[in-house]
Every structure is written in C-alpha cells, then in structure tokens.
Image (cartoon, helix red, strand yellow):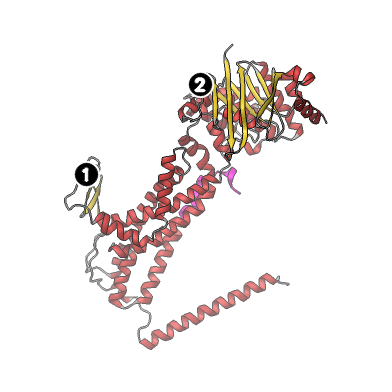
Amino acid sequence: MKWKRSRWLELALVVVVLTLVGILVNNLAVNLIRTGLGLSFEWLWQPAGFALSEHTLPYQPGDSTAWALLVSWLNSLRVIACSIVLATVLGVGAGAARRSLNPLLRQLAGLYVGLIRQIPLLLQLLFWYFVAFLGLPSQPFAPIGTLISLSNQGVGILGLNLSVEFSAVLVGLSVFTGAAIAEVVRGGLDSVPRGQWEAFRSLGINEGLGLRRVVLPQALPAILPALSSQYLNLAKNSTLAIAVGYADLYAVSDTAITQTGRAIEGFLILLLSFLALNLLINGGMQVLNRIVVHPAQRT
Amino acid sequence: MTIAVRAESITKTFNGTQKALDQVNLSVNHGEVLVVMGPSGSGKSTLIRTFNGLEAIDAGQLEIVGIPLDTDQDERQIRRIRRRVGMVFQQFNLFPHLSILDNITLAPIRVKKVSKANAEQRAHGLLAQMGIADQAMKYPAELSGGQQQRVAIARALAMDPELMLFDEPTSALDPERVKEVLDAMRRLAADGMTMIVVTHELGFAREVADRVLFMDAGRVVELTDSTTFFTQAKEERSRRFLNQMAH
C-alpha cells in the first residue's frame, strides 16, 4: 500500500495536535492536583444562593446552580433569537435601501451602516442602557398609541413587558448586527447581474416587487453563508450583556465561578453551551439554505 | 397615424465628456419598423435605452407613446411608459429562478393585475406563437439561446406593448440559432407591431425595416427608407459601413 505525500503530512499534523492537547491536559491535571482542587461538578447541585433579575422559568436563590445556569441560558437564547429577527429586518431593509432609487433613503442607510460599524459594540450597549433606556422618564409614556409604552422601568410592547436590560441588549445587538447584515445584503444584491434589474424594470415592475421576486431570490446564495456567520457573531457578542447587568449565561456563569472558585469547570460548561448554541444556528441556516436556494442556482 | 416615439435634439453624456447621444432627432410612427445600425460605440443601444428610461437624457425632449420623458425622471411616469413598451436584450435577461411560464406571467399578474388563469392562458398562446409551446414548465438554463430569446420576446409581448425595443437581439446567439429569432421578429412585424431594432443583421433590415437609422459617434448620420439606404446611401460614412459589413 502506497500513501501519497499529503497523507503523511496529514498524519504528522494529527500527531502534533494530539501531542499539544496531551501537554495541555497534563498541565491542567498537574496543576489541579498541586492546588488540591481536582475536577468536580458537584457544586452544580448545590444551591446557587444568588438571585436572577429575570427568568422565564420559575427560579429562587435556593435552586441549584445547574438550574440557575439553565435559566440564564434560556435568557441568552431569548435575547439572541429576538435580536436575530430584529437585526435581519433592519439589515435587509438598510441593505436594500442602499440600492434604492431614492437618494435620501440611500444616504440614510449609508449613514447608519457607516456610523454603527465604526463604534465598538460595548460602547453601543452602554449607550443604549445608560443613555437611551435609563434616560427615559420614570412615568410610562406611549409614543405610538397603546402599542408601545416606554419608561426607565421597562418597555411594554403589545402587553409584553421587557426589562430595561433586555431591551438595551436587544436593541444594541440588533442595531450593531443589522449594520453588518446590511453590508452582506448589499453585496448580495450587487452580485446579481445588472441585466436582471433592467429586465424587471423594463416590464414596469416597481423596485420593491422586483427586489422581492427577482433580485433577492438570486442574491440569497451569496447572502446566506455570510448571514449565518453574522448570526454566529451576534450569539457570541451577546456575552457582552454582562456589561449592562442582563442575566445571560455568561454573566450568571461568571457569578457562579466567583462563588465556587470552579473556573475550569465553569468555562468548560460555557464553552459547550455556546458550541451547542452555535451548532444549532449553523444547522438551522443550512436547512434554510437547502429550502430557499433554488435547485437551478446551486453549484 | 399616431406617433410612438418623438425625440427632439436629445443628448446624453457619459462621464461628463463622452457624448453617447448628440442632438438626436427622431420620430417613429405606430406600425413602423425602424432598424438602427452603426459601428459599436455609435450610441445605438444608448438611444433605444433612453426610450424606456433605462438611460436618462441630459438635454432635449422625448415623448414615448404620448408620455413625456423629461430629463429629471419621475419613477411613476417611467413605469407608465414601461408598461406599454416592451424591451428585448442582447443577453435575454430571463429570470433564472423562475419557470418559463412564471417569467412570462410575473409582470401581467403583478403589474397589470391580470388573473393567474388568464395570464397563463395568454403565456401558452405566446409560447405557441414563438414556436416553443412545449417549454413552459422548464427553467431558462434548460433552453438554447435561441429559445431563451424567444421566451424573452414572449415575456415582453405578454404586457401587450404598443412599441417593442430590440437591443441587438441576435448578437449573443450561435449562428444557427439566429434565424429562429429573426423569423419570430418577422412575424411580429407582419402583424403590425411597432418595432425599433438595433441589429447588425443586414438581411433582416433590408427585408423587414421600413426605415433605417444610421448612427456614428452619437449622431444621426442618415435616416432614410431601407431601400434607399441599401442601394444608394447618401453619406460616405454609411456606404463605408455597408461595404465593411458585406465583407
């Protein structure tokens, strides 16, 4: 049996990687033994002892730390899912507006994308929390009918009550990721040949309909892969929620780690949780890709 | 006889200096077939693209099927014109993700609000007229170039246009596919359709055109009936062009 050179290189690489992982694990074990800690997950079943500012499932400080982590993971999921929807709406709108025939719309969208992409996300989150939401009056007021009520105690939308922390993270992540998605969408639209725009315009089809029925379906193969990496970024960026005190998985894990001193176990759980979450998003996007990208366009 | 196109000293400049159209005057009657010829870069494509607002003119006056098309274009005004003016492109520009049937019925259903059943019936009729009745459920990529171009013609005709613009409709085709497209255009002309055709096909021009417009460097060199153009062109530039085309 003769192996090609590339096979030997592959094997060499595997050996190197395994060796490095081995060194790492050995290092970890030696140090854990030296400090007398050892790896243990027992603390997960001890009472957490701390309160969570918001929870979708029933939770009390007397519940286990594992339960606290699960509840906070759901908090993360909730803000990530809502942000993905809002960021997509914002991004597709702004991306399409950048190719609008209306110069005002084009400039506004350009300003949004240009401005938001220049400012660090952490600063934006702090702005939304401390300036925008905490700056609201303490008495609720309704700017558009009874649909939305705003105050520095929380935001009400259609009878749903959102905390100020959740709102700040939601808006911050959505506005930030929306600007990135706008660029993805614009690039996708530009990948569709000029002739397609001219063809629908020549038939008297207006820009909105032409975008929906002619251009966007053809732009999707170019948009979707970049879009899913923006969703993954959004999920990872949600850990910055700790800065405004939103009880997301990272913030709560941080608290648990501080209280128990179980940093390695805590980070392992964090890593695996985010890995699971992002595999979920990635899988979802692959299914979407298979559904919406037309067979005639697949390469 | 009513007038389909009236252009008065229209001018179009690219990049601030290069004149694509220089003081072009033209009047085309309903029912007329006008062939536009000229060397590449002479402004023929630009000219017919101004007729449905794909290019804006910088100066002059333009009136298409009775609707003025000013230098500052109003989108709604342009769409009124486009609903009544069909256009066929060199590269077909069919919508690759839609079936042949959907390519043809999209605009009638969404723009003219024709019922789906009526639009599909009309589409099948047009495909039969184009000699490709059996292709309705296929996708553009499954058709030959000549078939695709005939679908493009059917798609434009489905809006019942008063004027058809053809921008080098056979230039992207294999030589053996040119005839089937030209034949479809001949039948269209015989039915009395008003047509403005940018083409290098001398045979088609000689046989089908009522008049020939010869352009060079954005200017009208000669505008005359086709017999005169092919037998005794007045301008030296036209004669030289015809001479080169014949070889």
Relative horizontal placement of residue B75, taking residue B195 as reference (left or right):
left
Q: Which residue is mark 1?
A: A142
Q: Examine the image and state in which quarter residue A118 appears.
A: bottom left
Answer few, some or many: residues within 10 Å of disc 1's Cα (few below 14, many 20 plus, some between 14 and 19). few
Q: Which residue is most to the front?
A: B17
**Chain of the residue under the numbered disc 1 shown in the image:** A
Q: How many marks?
A: 2
Residue A201 image position (x, y, % from top left): 53, 32
**Chain of the residue under the numbered disc 2 shown in the image:** B
Residue A280 image position (x, y, % from top left): 44, 58
Q: Which residues are magenta?
A: A283-299
Determine the residue positioned at 19% across, 46% down. Answer: A141
Q: Is residue B88 visible?
A: no
Relative horizontal placement of residue A240, taking residue A106 as reference (left or right):
left
Q: Amino acid at mark 1?
A: Ala
Q: Is residue B140 visible?
A: yes
- In the structure shown, which secondary structural element does the residue marked by tag 1 occupy? loop
Q: Is residue A96 above or below residue B58?
A: below
Q: Was residue A296 drawn as part of the magenta stretch in this picture?
A: yes
